Image (cartoon, rainbow, N blue to C red):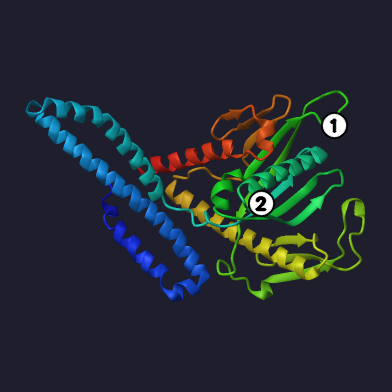
Amino acid sequence: MFENLDDISEKRETLEMQLSDPEVVGNQQQYQKLVREHSHVARLDELYKEYQAVCRDIEENTEILHHEADDPELAELARNESEELGERKSKLEEKIRLLLLPRDPNDEKNILLEIRAGTGGDEAALFVADLFRMYSRYAEGRGWKIEVMSSNPIGIGGFKEIIALIKGEQVYSRLKYESGVHRVQRVPETETQGRIHTSAVTVAIIPEAEEVDLHIEPGELKFDVYRSSGPGGQSVNTTDSAVRITHLPTGLVVTCQDEKSQHKNKAKALQVLRARLLDQIQQEQHDKISEERKSQVGSGDRSERIRTYNFPQGRITDHRINLTLYKLEQILAGNLDEVILPLITHYQTEALNLLQ
């Protein structure tokens, strides 16, 4: 079944030799890439060896059962062991198949988390803050670092939008299924009749783009500087530190005014712009491949309503996998794995089914 893994040990040894090469160690980018590949190959090698050992045990048991009359007691032991070996083989096959799935090249990347208020006015803006708090707590729990790149506060504790960079191990692979429309149903504090209002917030998970991923010609960018302003039109500072960057070929615009330094705002805005451009290019490639193959696993369309947070019932529902949990408070407190892990399993299963 896994004949193409017969040389996996050899590949592991080659990678280990490369990792001990001083030239490779001196190139941190290449070294980190090889470390990740080695970790993947080593795991595959260990599972394949275990799988081969189980297959040998099954063959031996089958041989013993063919000669049951020669040693009935040994045959009984083999029969009792056969069921357990069959289960172990199935589990190992599943684990190996998952490791053999085509890997998303963005899985190891840091991300830009963009949360924007949709329909619902102030209530939507307040929910932007709630979601940002949820993702921040989840990030902290996993030892990730989070840095606000840009924000547009409304003055009552909410945001029209907030953009943050999240750095850490496997950030994109964990959060990539969070893109889409998140709907909230609750009674606003200003509602005197006790009526439930429905608001919507859009979340985008964009892999961070390195300079090597994307080259932007200086002539493609237009820079504008202006004075930062806070909620209610208050002046944040008295210098032209806010930066607006326009990518002329695509019309993409990014603004940043959170820092007091124009230089820092420019650097952050460029980082956001680079990520958005790379995401746009990859999305176009993804759409083209999907049209050609007609075998897309989840569109990832950010216009899709993916989740509903119902406060009166304490309920959270993920509509893609029909998952409903009455743990709204815990999940908003950052215990997101109860939603994320079933999503990862669902999409992995879909991908496996396509390969069969």
Horizontal arrangement in the rendering, residue 38 relative to residue 324 (left or right): left
Q: Position of residue 190 (x, y in %)?
A: 87, 32
Q: Residue tagged by mark 1?
A: 189
Count of numbered badges drawn on the protein: 2
Give whichever of discs 2 and 1 has the lower sequence position: 2
Horizontal arrangement in the rendering, residue 154 relative to residue 217 (left or right): right
Relative to 311, does residue 301 appear above or below in the rendering? Answer: below
Label 2: state its secondary structure: strand
Q: Residue tagged by mark 2?
A: 113
Q: CA distance from mark 2 to mark 1?
A: 27 Å
Relative to 259, does residue 201 appear above or below in the rendering? Answer: above
- The three-letter code of the residue at mark 1 reads Glu
Q: Tell me if residue 195 can be seen.
A: yes
Residue at far left of view: 70
Q: Position of residue 264 (x, y in %)?
A: 76, 67
Who is closer to the viewer here, 271 or 31?
Answer: 31
Q: Position of residue 158 (x, y in %)?
A: 81, 44
- The three-letter code of the residue at mark 2 reads Leu
Label 1: state its secondary structure: loop
At x 89%, y 68%, the residue is 239
Image quarter for residue 112? bottom right
Question: Where's the C terminus, which quadrant?
Answer: top left
Q: Tell me if residue 118 can be seen.
A: no
Relative to 281, does residue 327 appear above or below in the rendering? Answer: above
